[in-house]
Amino acid sequence: MTDGNAAELCVVCRARRAPDAERAVVRSNVRRFTSERFAVWRCRSCGSIHADQPVDLASYYRAYPMHSVDLDWRARAVYRVQLGRLVRAGFRREHSLIDYGCGSGSFVQFLRSAGYPHCVGYDRFNSAFAKESLLGEKYDCVFSQDVLEHVDDPMALLGVLRGLLAPKGLLAIGTPNASAIDLAHPEAYVHTLHQPYHRNILSKPALLDLGAPFELSLLRYHPRSYINTALPFINHRFLIHYLRCLDNTFDAAFEPVRPSLRLLSPVGVFWGLFGFLLAPETDVMVLYRAG
């Protein structure tokens, strides 16, 4: 079932869905909805992946696990990776930043605690951060992690983010990479597909070309997730292993650590110690500079 003519077009490159387009059906990875199944399809032109059916996202975002993230030692470890990327791209303590789609606001809290006082967060799905007046300002850095894939029109969102940038501002977008997802094995990519929340997942070529229509110059492409650190047991591969040792839901990543004998297996120890060296390219970041 598709949403009329709109679902027949790729919202990224506007190509019409081919009759033989690659398709898959995948379960939700959020515990409350694991019994539900969702169809996705891949654009043959640009390689991006799209949700096939419209959903009432507001109902799915009620009690969303990401909105309960605490700034614990694990969060600080991965946020240091994010901050390092921004600093290497030119972000400074005196600069202003908006975290667009900030979830629980924990990254903004981290930045302020690290000596970056001019940081704010906005998230329309979290009433604590749904302050519309923030969208009337300009910022030296617009940061948007795991948001682009959640909207029905990624290009419209990019226009909003571009409008928030001050001259020569930095735009940082963290998002999944459709090019690294094999739809022949959807369960293996259940957390990257993250249905029904991920509406459109752009391919690597689409991400690299994303800024051109908005006068944004590609500054840097990071092929690994920000959760991939060199700290033992804080890396992307081990996180996936950890979730599979439990109930393999998104929720388990945001709950207190639950010990499991499988975590102490040779496979678990290997991923814990060396997983950061073998991180997949499923979650990436692109950095752009405004003209």
Image (cartoon, rainbow, N blue to C red):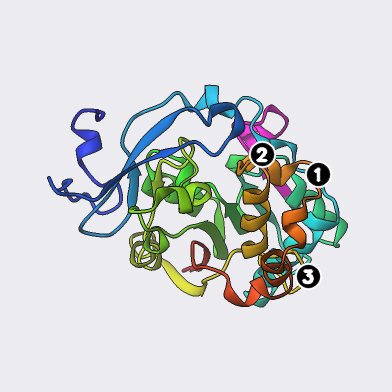
Relative to 161, 99 lies left or right: right
* Residue with the mark numbered 2: 251
Mark linked to residue 89:
none
163 or 269, which is in the foreground? 269
* Residue with the mark numbered 3: 232
Q: Position of residue 3 (x, y in %)?
A: 26, 28
Amino acid tagged 3: Pro
Amino acid tagged 1: Asp
Q: Position of residue 239 (x, y in %)?
A: 66, 57
Cα–Cα gap, marks 1 and 3: 20 Å
Relative to 95, 149 lies left or right: left
Judge the density around disc 3: few (<14), some (14-19), many (≥20) Cα neighbours within 10 Å: some
Q: Is residue 226 visible?
A: no
Q: Is mark 1 on a helix, strand or loop?
A: loop
Give, as a single range, the part of the protein colored magenta: 120-133
Q: Where is residue 266 in the image (x, y as percent from the top left)?
A: 71, 69
* Residue with the mark numbered 1: 70
Say whether marks 1 and 2 touch (CB < 8 Å). Answer: no
Q: Residue at x 38, y 34 (%)?
A: 38
Q: Is residue 100 magenta?
A: no
Amino acid tagged 2: Asp
